[in-house]
Image (cartoon, rainbow, N blue to C red):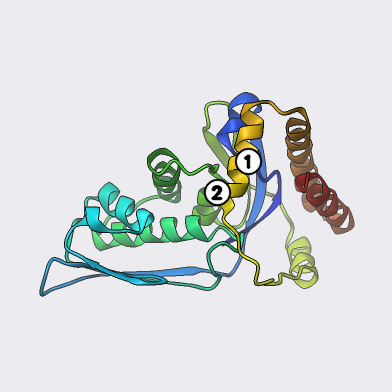
C-alpha cells in the first residue's frame, strides 16, 4: 500500500496529457497478500476475496481484476486464488493497485516467469486503465510495484519515469517517529471522486486546473524539503497540499 506525499491527481491522463504530471509517494508496511495454487482434481477457478467465487471459465468471474489478470497471463482454469488485505478497499491507500500488482506477480510466479517491477506496474496499468477504463492514473501501480519513497514523472504521452527520492537515513528515521496514520472507518469509491476531477480537467475548469498546477509545484517542493531533511517545511507543505487538494 502507499501514501502519496505530493502531486497526487496530476498523474491522471486528463491532466498529464496536457501538462505532464509529478507525484512523490511512499510505500508503507501494509500489504495485500495473494496466494495462487493449482487445483489438481478439476479445472475450476476458486477465487476468495471479500466473497468466494467458483466458476468453470475465466469469463464467468465477477471480480474484474482477477478476470483480466488471468486473461493477460493466459491462465484459464484449475486455480485457487486467495486474497487477504491489511487495509479494507476504499480506504485511500491504493488497495486496488496493490491487489492487481500482487496478483500479477503471483500468477507469473506460478508460471515460473520472472518479471520486472516495471513490467508488473505496466501490466497493472493496462488492466485498470486500458481494459477496465478506470478513471485513474499510474501512480498507485508504480509505487506499489517499486516501493520506497519514489518520484514519478509523467510526460504528455503518459510515459512514466521513476527515480528514488534522495532522503537520508536520519530524515527517514525522523519521519517514521513523527508520522501517524489513522483508520477512520470511512470508505469511499475513489472512481467517483476521480471521475469528477477528470470531467473538470477535460473541460479545463480554471479553478481545478489552477489547483492541479499548484499541487504539482508543491510535489516538487516536498521532494526538495525531504531531501534537505527539512521536516518542518515538509509538514507545512503537506498541510498546504491538503488545503489545495480539498478544492
Callout 2: SS: helix
Residue 182 lies left or right of residue 117; in this view the side is right
Image spot of residue 238 (x, y percent): 81, 53
Question: Which residue was labeled with disc 2?
Answer: 191
Q: Nearer the viewer, residue 144 or 41?
A: 41
Q: Does residue 49 lie above or below 96 as drawn?
A: below
Q: Does residue 29 lie above or below 64 as drawn?
A: below
Q: Nearer the viewer, residue 92 or 25?
A: 92
Residue found 43% across the figure and 56% down from its top: 101
Image disc number at residue 196: 1
Image disc number at residue 163: none
Q: Does residue 115 lie above or below 179 as drawn?
A: above
Estimate how packed mark 2 is, as few (under 14), some (14 to 19) or many (20 or more) residues with alpha carbons within 10 Å: few
Residue 219 lies left or right of residue 65; in this view the side is right
Image spot of residue 246 (x, y percent): 77, 48
Q: Quadrant of the N terminus?
A: bottom right
In terms of image quadrants, where is residue 49?
bottom left
Image spot of residue 139 (x, y percent): 57, 46
Q: How many marks?
A: 2
Residue 231 lies left or right of residue 9; in this view the side is right
Circle 2/circle 1 CB separation < 8 Å: no
Q: Reading the chain from its start, which is encountered first: label 2 or label 1? A: 2
Q: Nearer the viewer, residue 124 or 108?
A: 124
Estimate how packed mark 1 is, as few (under 14), some (14 to 19) or many (20 or more) residues with alpha carbons within 10 Å: few
Image spot of residue 129 (x, y percent): 45, 41
Callout 1: SS: helix
Q: Quadrant of the C terminus?
A: top right
Q: How far is mark 2 from mark 1, CA to CA?
A: 9 Å
Residue found 78% across the figure and 32% down from its top: 207
Amino acid at each position: 500500500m502507499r501514501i502519496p506525499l505530493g502531486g497526487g491527481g496530476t498523474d491522471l491522463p486528463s491532466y498529464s496529457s496536457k501538462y505532464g504530471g509529478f507525484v512523490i509517494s511512499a510505500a508503507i508496511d501494509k500489504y495485500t497478500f495473494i496466494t495462487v495454487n493449482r487445483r489438481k482434481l478439476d479445472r475450476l477457478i476458486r477465487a476468495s476475496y471479500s466473497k468466494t467465487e467458483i466458476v468453470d471459465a475465466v469469463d464467468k468471474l465477477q471480480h474484474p481484476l482477477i478476470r483480466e489478470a488471468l486473461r493477460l497471463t493466459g491462465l484459464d482454469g484449475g486455480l485457487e486464488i486467495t486474497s487477504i488485505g491489511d487495509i479494507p478497499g476504499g480506504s485511500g491507500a491504493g488497495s486496488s493497485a496493490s491487489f492487481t500488482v500482487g496478483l500479477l506477480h503471483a500468477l507469473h510466479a506460478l508460471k515460473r516467469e520472472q518479471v520486472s517491477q516495471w513490467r508488473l506496474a505496466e501490466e497493472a496499468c493496462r488492466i485498470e486503465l486500458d481494459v477496465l477504463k478506470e478513471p485513474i492514473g499510474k501512480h498507485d501501480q508504480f509505487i506499489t510495484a517499486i516501493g520506497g519513497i519514489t518520484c514519478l514523472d509523467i510526460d504528455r504521452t503518459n510515459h512514466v519515469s521513476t527515480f528514488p527520492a534522495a532522503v537520508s537515513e536520519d530524515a527517514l528515521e525522523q519521519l517514521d517517529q513523527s508520522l501517524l496514520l489513522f483508520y477512520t472507518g470511512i470508505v469511499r469509491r475513489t472512481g467517483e471522486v476521480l471521475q469528477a476531477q477528470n470531467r473538470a480537467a477535460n473541460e479545463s475548469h480554471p479553478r481545478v486546473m489552477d489547483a492541479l498546477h499548484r499541487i504539482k509545484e508543491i510535489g516538487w517542493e516536498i521532494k526538495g524539503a525531504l531531501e534537505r531533511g527539512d521536516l518542518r517545511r515538509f509538514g507545512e507543505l503537506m498541510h498546504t497540499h491538503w488545503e489545495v487538494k480539498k478544492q
